Image (tube, rainbow, N blue to C red):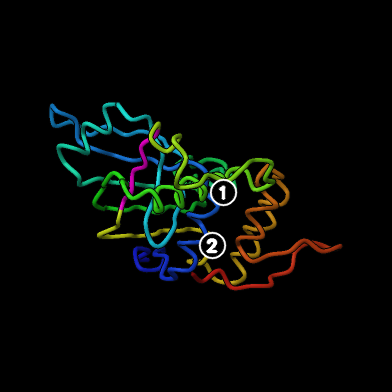
């Protein structure tokens, strides 16, 4: 079965929801010797762009100053599927349910104070939703103490594997095995797969088509 098209996230809304929820992304830039440098970063996705904050000096900033073409990705492993789900003798059948977003884009340093404030407050709203802080204002001197990197995507691709490539019966069988295995992520994974737990097992409430 050709899975490439089936695994593609076609819903931009789903891509945005994932980027809004995910806490760690990785930005890739090219260093002075031509090697890619990959750094994990907190980020926020606003107005169709990725924003990250950084110290005002550092290798990734130097890299971007030389070459503003960058990569960015965020991913989440939902559930590892052990090989014995299919065959206790064939390790090659192990698999993973996942979501991933990969961006190629143009990076820049935000100099507009209003946009910089919007990005930094967006980061706080995302990572500290309970509040208990004073929002930044564009006139504050603290804005000069940090850099804000903006990535405008030139291409944005999402992939996911949550059972959408399986028929309903096989998907239910897999869901029951995940429930029985009872990993720390099982309940969340089953919800994303379109199942809910009921008294006598599981019920499919949604087709996992993105």
- Residue 189, image quadrant: bottom right
| In-front residue for pair 181/86 | 181
- Which one is in front in this view, the residue at disc 2 or the one at disc 1? 1
Residue 18 appears in view: yes
Q: Residue at 44% of width from left, 54% of height from top? A: 45
Quadrant (top left, top right, bottom left, bottom right) of the N terminus: bottom left
| Residue drawn at point x = 55 percent, y = 52 percent | 21
Q: Residue at x 41, y 68 (%)?
A: 6
**Pointer 2 or 1: first along the chain:** 1
Q: Residue at x 64, y 48 (%)?
A: 129
Dot 2 lies on which element?
Answer: loop
Q: Residue 154: percent from the left, percent from the top?
A: 25, 59
- Number of other residues with Cα within 10 Å of mark 1, as a class: few under 14, some 14 to 19, many 20 or more: some
117 falls in the magenta region: no
Distance between the alpha carbons at the discs numbered 2 and 1: 29 Å
Q: Residue 62's spot in the image, x, y percent?
A: 22, 31
Label the magenta part by its dominant secondary structure.
strand
Q: Is residue 51 left or right of residue 59?
A: right
- Look at mark 1 in the image and give the residue it sits on: 126
- List the residue tagged with mark 2: 163
Q: Residues within 10 Å of mark 2 (few under 14, many from 20)?
A: many
Query: Which residues fall within the magenta stretch?
Result: 146-151
Kindly tell me whether residue 79 is visible in this rendering. no
129 and 4: which one is in front?
129
């Amino acid at each position: 079965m050709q899975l490439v098209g089936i695994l593609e996230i076609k819903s931009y809304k789903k891509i945005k929801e994932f980027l809004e929820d995910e806490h760690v992304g990785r930005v890739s830039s090219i260093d002075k010797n031509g090697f890619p440098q990959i750094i994990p970063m907190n980020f926020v996705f606003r107005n169709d762009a990725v924003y990250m904050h950084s110290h005002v000096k550092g290798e990734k900033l130097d890299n971007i100053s030389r070459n503003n073409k960058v990569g960015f990705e965020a991913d989440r492993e939902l559930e590892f599927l052990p090989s014995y789900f299919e065959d206790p003798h064939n390790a090659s059948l192990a698999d993973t349910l996942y979501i991933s977003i990969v961006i190629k884009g143009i990076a820049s340093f935000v100099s507009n104070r209003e946009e910089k404030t919007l990005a930094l407050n967006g980061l706080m709203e995302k990572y500290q939703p309970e509040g208990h802080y004073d929002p930044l204002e564009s006139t504050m001197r603290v804005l000069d103490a940090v850099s804000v990197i903006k990535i405008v995507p030139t291409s944005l691709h999402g992939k996911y594997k949550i059972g959408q490539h399986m028929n309903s019966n096989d998907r239910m069988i897999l869901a029951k095995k995940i429930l029985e295995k009872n990993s720390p992520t099982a309940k969340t994974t089953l919800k994303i797969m379109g199942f809910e737990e009921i008294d006598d097992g599981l019920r499919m409430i949604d087709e996992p088509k993105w």
